[in-house]
Amino acid sequence: MTDTPEGSDFIQVSAGGLYSVALRENGTLISWGHHSSKLITDTPNESDFIQVSAGDYHSVALREDGTLTSWGSDSKGQISDTPKDSNFIQVSAGDGYSVALKEDRTLVSWGNDKYNQISDTPLSSNF
């Protein structure tokens, strides 16, 4: 277990299953809580992040250049299937899957499709 970080420079926070991750003003990430699936030790240490989301056993973060980075458990492809392209503007991690919004207002999802979280993703950009 790791303790809640101190400081007053946080701009976003997200709670996962047994851990949390936060984004600092300088674009760096910090994770704390139960260390399972390398959620804490594999947190990226770069300083170019603008958003982060914690899922049950994985996290995903959005970089300034519109690309995505994910870490943690890859039991359902939630890490290895992370899109490699750019132009993303928002991301959210769930229970074994993630979904991201692109600049053109289309959605991309990847990971666990047990309940059609991936296959039922709307293809339209009429949001």
Image: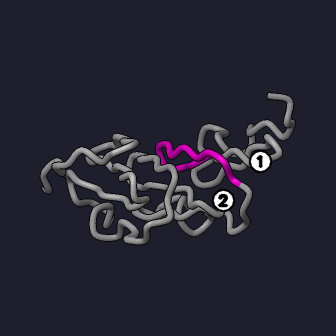
Name the residue located 50 percent from the left edge and 42 percent from the top edge: 94
Q: Residue at x 53, y 64 (%)?
A: 69
Residue at x-position 46% and y-position 50%: 52
Looking at the image, residue 23 sits to the left or right of residue 35; the answer is: right
Residue receiving disc 1: 103
Q: Secondary structure at mark 1?
A: loop
| Region rendered in magenta | 88-99
Residue drawn 68% across and 69% down?
A: 84
Quarter of the image that includes the N terminus = bottom left
Give the percent coordinates (x, y) of residue 110: 64, 54
Provide the major secondary structure of the magenta segment. strand
Question: Which numbered marker is on residue 66?
Answer: 2
Q: Is residue 119 magenta?
A: no
Q: Quadrant of residue 42?
A: bottom left
Quadrant in which residue 28 is drawn = bottom left
How far is the residue under mark 2 from the one under mark 1?
9 Å
Q: Is residue 46 left or right of residue 10?
A: right
Residue 85, position in %: x, y? 73, 66
- Decide: few, some or many residues near mark 2? Use Cα within 10 Å; few <14, some 14-19, many ≥20: some
- Labels 2 and 1 touching (C-beta < 8 A): yes
Q: Nearer the viewer, residue 37 or 125?
A: 125
> How far from the left and from the top, in percent, is residue 25?
39, 52
- Amino acid beneath label 2: Gly
Quick one: quadrant of the C terminus? Answer: top right
Which one is in front, 80 or 124?
124
Q: Is residue 96 magenta?
A: yes
Percent x, y of residue 78: 54, 59
